[in-house]
Amino acid sequence: MTAIAAAPTAPSERPWHRELAAMPLALRLVESSTSVVLRERVSELLRRQVGMAWSACLYLEGSGRWLGLDNSDAQFDCSDFRHPYAHVVRSGKPLLLSVRDARTRLDHPDFQAQIACLNPQLHLLVRPLRGADSRKTWLGALVMAGDASTLEVLVNDPGMGALETFVCQLWQRLSQEQGERQRSQVLKASLEKLNDGARRQALADQLSKGLLGQSAAMQALRGKVVRAAETNLAVLLEGETGTGKDCVARALHQLSARSKAPFMAINCAAIPEALLESELFGHEKGAFSGADHAREGLISQADGGTLFLDEIGDMPLALQAKLLRVLESGCYRPLGASNERYADLRLVAATHQPLREHISEKRFRADLYYRLGQFPLALPPLSQRQGDIALLAECFIADFCAREGRHEMGITPSALRVLNARDYPGNVRELKNLVDYACAMTPDGADIDVGMLPTIQAEAPDSASPMPLAPQEKLSFLENVDDLKEALRDVEAAIISQRLAHFDGNRTQVAKSLGLPKRTLAHKCRLLELDTK
């Protein structure tokens, strides 16, 4: 199979070339928006203006390994000589052969499918398409089916060569523009992603003022809260008691598009079952005994905003069915009302109970559980946030001082070590209660020390007998000692601080209760930096 050369014909023998000069279709080539459109229009031009029975423009894939056809799954490997395109790409020269020969000598299935409908009397002309740059970049191949005489003229025709050069220049320009657009789109997407990430990070940082903590668990939680706030999905907050589910619910509302609308909250465990339905759905006058006037329920009040149902696990089954309908349709009916009403709200529910177990025990509806948990959020216990205890303690101290009108106070390192070593089954709420107690026990002008913490607080002794230390289980922090001298200093400081608090700073009584000379006690107080007022 060899390439065939033919002498160029005179312009008068090329009427299609004069028609091309009239430019209607050539102008369409220039106006092509993409290389795909250009290839389609080239094939159309050859069929309509040159009279080809069939024409196609194949593109060379980016790796240079195969040729493809737009809107087709066919692939032609450039090293597979069972189709004519490989011969043209390898030689860089036009190839002319009859359809009959192509069917008998070439057995590539995709190529055979291409020419299956062609008249065997026709011939095929395949021409290579290369760029006009110095490297002569391969672009693809042009294949035409027509009369042998017409195709023989086109093999070396200058007009055909001019058309191919024109097409290749347009093709390269469109490919370059498309590449630039793709790079621009990738850059734009990267910038949008970066800006979106920066925006979310800024919102998460904003949340750190209310959802305190720099631990990995809290940073991850704040990121999820930001994501949840961007949606209208129902959120289910799950976590141990005292982990701050109410704070997270308010944060979700404040970051959402509903932030200017009401935030309504109710604790389902704190309302008697007989009144909970009225609290949620409202009632008409005379709906039940004692209903002297109509009352708007929380669902109505939360219209446009957020409804927070704390301890959802304690909601009665009958109410669960009605709540599910509100979530699915927004419709509800107040007690005693004849007409339904509609509310557009976002629901946030919270529980510390194992709802999946309640489902298996028929105490909670499975359909409601899955509807509530469109965006589940698990709140970390304080045991997973050890690094946050100091920050939380400082915040609670500041809150106490502002609330109680006390002077600013701090907390000693030894007291912080005790707090860090403690278990907190009540989580953040328990820590806050401990700090509030210690603040109340600390004299004005002093910092919270170990002796002020209820974890080592002993019962009040009488002044004549020595004050006993706390039970051994309350000194569990000693199990974590890794510096004996420092631990002994902390214990000594705790004992003296405790006695000073008990005797209102009376050194004489403290020294007597500890069996120390008063001068020795004063020396220890200076070394331990203890307040002795």
Image (spheres, rainbow, N blue to C red):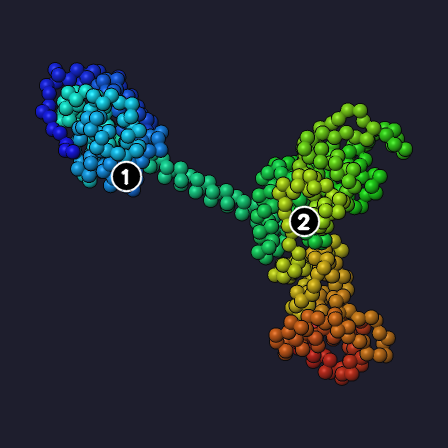
Nearer the observer, 69 or 410: 69
Q: Quadrant of the N terminus?
A: top left
Marks 2 and 1: which is nearer the front?
A: 1
Alpha carbon distance from label 2 to label 1? 57 Å
| 89 is higher (above) or lower (below) than 50 | below
Q: Earlier in the sequence, mark 2 or mark 1?
A: 1
Q: Amino acid at mark 2?
A: Glu
The residue wearing badge 1 is 77
* Residue drawn at 22 percent across, 30 percent down: 104
- In the picture provided, is 33 more to the left or to the right than 418? left
Q: Amino acid at mark 1?
A: Asp
Residue 288 percent across, percent down from the top left: 88, 32
Is 84 left or right of 37, judged from the image as shown? left
Name the residue at 71% across, 33% down. Answer: 325
Q: Quadrant of residue 150?
A: top left
Tag 2 residue? 238
Specify whether residue 300 is in view: yes
Q: Residues within 10 Å of mark 1 (few under 14, many from 20)?
A: some
Q: Secondary structure at mark 1?
A: strand
The structure residue drawn at horizontal position 85% and vertical position 76%, both measured from the top left corner, is: 463
**Which percent across, then down, holds residue 267?**
76, 44
Pick the front one: 377 or 303: 377
Q: Position of residue 40 (x, y in %)?
A: 30, 25
At mark 2, the secondary structure is: strand
User: Which residue shows up at 64% across the image and 54% down it?
Assistant: 380
